[in-house]
Amino acid sequence: MSAQATAVGQPSTSAKKTRKRILTGDRPTGERHLGHYVGSLANRVKLQEEYETFLLVADYHMLTTRLQGLEEIERNIRQTVLGNLAVGVDPSKTTIYLQSLVPEVTELFLYFAMIVTVPRAQRIPTLKEQMRDLDIAQPSYGLLGYPVLQAADILMVKGDLVPVGRDQQSHVEITREIAREFNDRFGPVFPVPDALIPEIGILPGTDGRIKMGNSLGNVVNLLDDSKTVEAKVMAMYTDPTRIRATDPGRVEGNPVFMYHDFFNPDTAEVADLKDRYRKGSVGDVEVKRKLATAINGFLDPIRDRADRLLRENPRIVDEVLHQGTARARAEAKQTLHELRAAMHLDYFGQ
Ligand code: TRP
């Protein structure tokens, strides 16, 4: 991958947009895991070849549901960025920046807050989901505004395409409404972006739950060492009704086999294991050992890239963020300049 050539390459800063632009984001929740890889990272690495890509680390967004333990954020930001670099997100193709270092986004958020009605924001399904999942009795003003801030992220760099999971589609929808409403009222400043929703299967947690996360303790991290991977795989949830290796087992919906399908390139081995599992002629231990080997094979180049990048430049993450943020900030200033002119808020012609 080309990230090796220089410490930090930079996308060209030509003001003219020649390629369509992508804006996507990660909340800085810490280490990237296999679920991130399947859900967004793999796609991101491909898309950066075709589109001019912006990737933000959404630390403001994180504050909408978390105001404690903030001393961890810095580490989480680093791990989030390093995970992206490790899978091949290339700073010479993708502008990686930290949201809170581009405070212009909050100004854009304020203008957009004037356009969106309270009932419209309350209708966004993720609000209820977050309140339910996190046991929040009353949403803060900031949580209500979560999708409006996301719209500001997207429109600040004039993103054309937004790769997000299906759960975030409603956020792109409100972004489209905001862009149209703004353009109708004040003139054509913003593109109306499209969501780019990948057709992917869903990877469950290692405990079989749909929700995955480091805080749930059910993930294999991309930078886990091979022993840790092995231990996590050997402890994976499998068919709970199967007691002995001679019992016929269920393959469908069995997380061990879902992981095999995603990460084991030896399809003949997987087919054989499934066949013997159904018949009750293979033990869980063998199936899991082979899965651990497959996952470790998959992770080797990712771990190697992270090691190499850090060896070559221990400050790589900071430098990537520093340069990416400068670039994003220049875009933000330009967009705000156009917006303020359109709204006649440029009193001193700024
Ligand atoms: N909301 C996204 C998430 O929860 C993170 C995010 C913030 C984002 N701003 C964005 C994603 C803009 C796409 C575009 O993961």
Image (tube, rainbow, N blue to C red):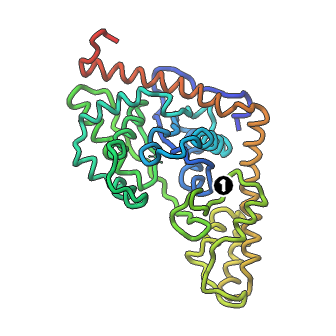
Quarter of the figure with the C terminus: top left
Q: In the drawing, does residue 283 fall left or right of residue 80?
A: right
Q: Position of residue 264 (x, y in %)?
A: 70, 64
Assess mark 1: CB under 8 A from ligand 1? no
Residue nearer the viewer, 257 or 30? 30
User: Is 277 placed above or below 30 here?
Assistant: below
User: Is 139 placed above or below 111 here?
Assistant: below
User: Is 153 placed above or below 198 here?
Assistant: above
Picture residue at 53% right of the left edge, 24% below the top: 327
Q: Position of residue 320 (x, y in %)?
A: 63, 30
Quarter occupied by residue 142: top left
Figure quadrant, ligand 1: top left
- What amino acid is at disc 1? Asn
User: Is 293 placed above or below 189 here?
Assistant: below
Picture residue at 48% right of the left edge, 58% below the top: 199
What residue sits right under mark 1 in the picture?
221
Q: In the drawing, does residue 335 fall left or right of residue 300?
A: left
